[in-house]
Amino acid sequence: MADDQADNRRSRGRNPRGQGERLREEIVVAAMGMLDELGDDQALSMRAVARAIGTAATSIYLHFEDRDTLVLAVLNRCHDDLMRAMTQAESSQSDPADQLRSRTMVLGEWAYRHPGLYTVLHESALNQRTDMAFRKELADGTVAAVRRCMDAGLVPSGDAAEVALDLRAAVHGAVSMRLHQPDQPWPPLEEQVERFLTKLVGVRRPQDRRTAATRRESQGQAVVGKRST
């Protein structure tokens, strides 16, 4: 009892400069790891998070008023990490179709590497009660990537938002089925994503695009040859 009271007094005191920010970061990182293991926001315990980082539970409540607030902070962190990874993947490509492919693979691979966090993000009780505004940013990014492909004439013109929704639904379905039915003989995710891009968006497969480029180059050389004669 005396130890708990001492913990409470310490937690209510002022933190030295920067210490509060460090503690908040430790809380988020610990909760992220636990949620990835649990795959269930309702199973997360604030006391368990406190034990994981060696602090009093009351210290957690100085930064997060309840479990939902902490879970949302974790999911916001996941979103930020995803956005950085997708931006880096897109920036490494100059072709809009390759940018869309890279972006889609980042999202699929992240979900596959973090099944618990993916489940909390899409299937948790919190997901049903809370408007997670950051998810719209992810969706809007995919719409923009599809629209760039359309504007460049790389895929058929159409409703970019509708096409992007179909693509996202297919990728999320593929990932979810892998997580819930791990014993199935699933093909490599990259192959499946390539088929989604071809059938749902209209992106040519890399080998088909190379063949078309070679054909155009040959036709161009033939035209030049005729003019020279």
Image (cartoon, rainbow, N blue to C red):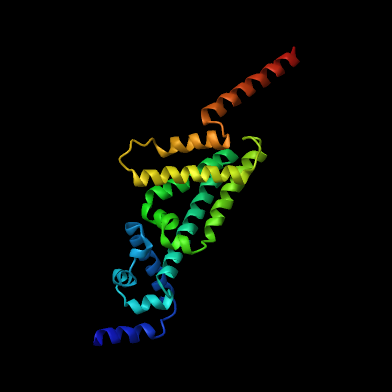
Which residue shows up at 49% across the image and 59% down it?
80
Q: Name the one closer to the observer, 161 or 140.
A: 161
Percent x, y of residue 221? 67, 19
In the image: residue 22, left or right of residue 83:
left
Residue 75, by quadrant, is: bottom left
Quarter of the image for the C terminus: give it: top right
**Taking 192 as reference, is 32 above or below it?**
below
**Taking 91 as reference, is 59 above or below it?**
below
Q: Residue furthest top?
A: 229
In the image: residue 136, left or right of residue 127:
right
Which residue shows up at 58% across the image and 34% down it?
202
Percent x, y of residue 6? 29, 86
Which residue shows up at 37% across the image and 43% down it?
178
- Exactly how many numbered labels are in the figure? 0
Quarter of the image for the N terminus: give it: bottom left
Which residue shows up at 56% across the image and 56% down it?
137
Residue 29, by quadrant, is: bottom left
Q: Name the one closer to the observer, 151 or 68.
A: 68
Percent x, y of residue 118? 41, 53
Residue 47, by quadrant, is: bottom left
